[in-house]
Amino acid sequence: MVVLKENNLLNSLSQMGVGLGAKNQAFELLKGLEFPTRKTEDWRYTSVKRILKKKYVQFNEADQVDLSNEIAPSLDAHNIILVNGVYSKELSDVNFPDEVLVDTFPNAMEEHVSLIHSTFNGIAKNNEEVFTALNTSYFHEGVFIHIPKKVKLEKPIHVIHVNTKSNVISNLRLLIVVDQFSEVSVVQSYASLNAIECLTNSVTEVFVKENAKVTLDKVQYEEPNNNLICTVQVDQKANSIFKINTATISGDFVRNGVNIDVDGENCTSEMNGLYMQKGIQHVDNHTKVSHLKPNCTSFELYKGVLRDKSTGVFNGKVIVAEDAQKIEAYQQNKNIILSREATMNAKPELEIFADDVKCSHGTTTGQFDEEALYYLQTRGLSKESAQALLMQAFADEVLDKVDSEVLRIWIKEKLG
Amino acid sequence: MLKVKNLHASVGDKEILKGLDIEVKAGEIHAVMGPNGSGKSTLSSVLAGRDEYEVTAGEVDYLGKELLELNPEERSWEGIFLAFQYPVEIPGVSNINFLKTAINERRKYFEQEPIAAKDFLKMVKEKSTLVELSDKLKNRSVNVGFSGGEKKRNEIFQMAMLEPKLSILDETDSGLDIDALRIVAHGVNTLKSKHNATILITHYQRLLDYIIPDFVHVLYDGRIIKTGGKELALELEEKGYDWLTKAKA
């Protein structure tokens, strides 16, 4: 049991004033919280020990970064750049059309104080989730994205986070509010440039209002030895569409939490994930979709390949509330294990309190299809290229969910 | 081209081939017939290089090479092709892309440049016409959503693309309606030349109405118990296998 204040992680952090009550509340709350252990149900297969024993440094000013390095996929997008956890105004796109607002919390507060107060930490307020509380207490200036009513932003907003120094701790906070009948695509890239042993604790809150459509693509490709905790909290109102795709390409310790509250009828929610692990990498995907209202559909597809001594966790929870009839929820998790020493823990969970629903889930963990390998070999594919082809086909099923072709190709190349 | 001598093969501890001999020369078509469980599919699997089969004795000479020393892809590069009885469905792997990779890997093996895109497309067009395979099927995932007949036509299409020296057709006629059978047979007959050879593994005489063999072999209990001309197949159709197997027993 590690009480937070006794841990050196907190000693490396200092609080920045943003003037949000929720921040101070979380700070107070933190004093009594503990880091999860293997006994904590949601962390049963993921030990945080390896990230807690390290020492970290917090940055409060944006460092320079040489953008001639390919730090992120070259999307035709509005780029928002954070260096070592700090928003860089210099490097970020500041001109947005149609009254779209993208700025730091302190700046956005000037114009949108009531909107921020009514939304910020509204869905992330999980008092028991220590990393979210930590993020709320210590995030720097954060980024606020507001898409007003009936606006379809043509280009995606690309939030690029890059660590340029080793042992950096950063608490990234992103709040996305998409008003009625609007549409936006947001990409979050997690990169590092010659930086190791960093800890990035990212929390993204998304409010998808009535008839709005939001896509969130997460691309995680920090160099090995880096640690990443990503939490995404989503609130969906009636007739809205939300899709999240998470590609975990590298990073030593990655924990992804996706929680969607579907609080309106006729919504579609989609969660997809792809992870390709090697070495001693550990990737944990925890998802939870709560169907609170009737007539909605959710789809979930997570696939992974584990090599060497890597370990993986998939925990997908689907909750259908008592009055949420006519829900269709489909969940699949498929894994290929290429080494005797790799481990996968997969756990689908359905909690259904309504009686007129259509739900399915399935999880498979195995090796390559031997029949398919042999077939391809008899056609003249070497075993290696037959495996590569099957691997690609396996990954493509998830990658095809990514709408941007540029992003899809980029992820494919990174996966090698 | 192919000389099989005293071939013994087992799966687990069960011996299936028990001293099989067969010789195939360029330009010839051989039919291997026999009742269920006689070892027909084992023969095709051993020749194609499937892992599960263990060869315990005998030798296979293919164009002067020890065939059993080669892995499945090397056998393919050297010109052996197996048309599967049950072609495998491979979701997400495009029929055309994998064939291009296959052709280029063979070219690499022979230290040749990759095939030009234009030549490849021309070849695809020509060979798919031969077995009446639609564009839709060519571009789909390998065998996924194909009917039984389409799968078999796809096997012959792949055979045409890979231009093998020795083709082994494992029960290619099973599950085919008469039209599909005609298309498949037309493909095989068109591809026949004095430089290549074919082994037809089959249960029924039906296929041999369309593809005329030079030799017919009867496989029973892991051995070839009789060899004859095309008329042997007709005799088998009429009398069944009993008169041969009983004589043997």
Image (cartoon, coloured by chain):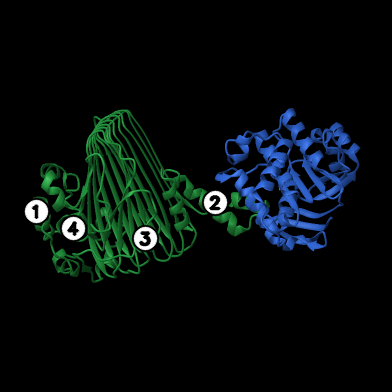
Chain colours: A green, B blue
Question: Mark 2 — on which chain does it sit?
Answer: A
Chain letter of mark 1 equals: A
Name the residue: 12% across, 45% down. Answer: A111
Q: Is residue B38 visible?
A: no
Of mark 2 and mark 4, the one earlier in the sequence is 4
Q: Which residue is mark 3?
A: A71
* Mark 1 vs 2: CB contact within 8 A: no
In the rendered image, which residue does mark 2 sit on?
A: A390
Mark 4 lies on a secondary structure that is loop
Disc sitting over residue A139 in the figure? 4
> Which three-letter amino acid code belongs to the residue tagged 1?
Gly
Whole-number angstrom distance, CA of label 1 to CA of label 2: 52 Å
Mark 2, residues whose alpha carbon is within 10 Å: few (<14), some, or many (≥20)?
A: many
Q: Which residue is mark 1?
A: A19
Q: How many angstroms separate mark 3 from mark 1 (CA)?
A: 32 Å
Q: How many marks?
A: 4
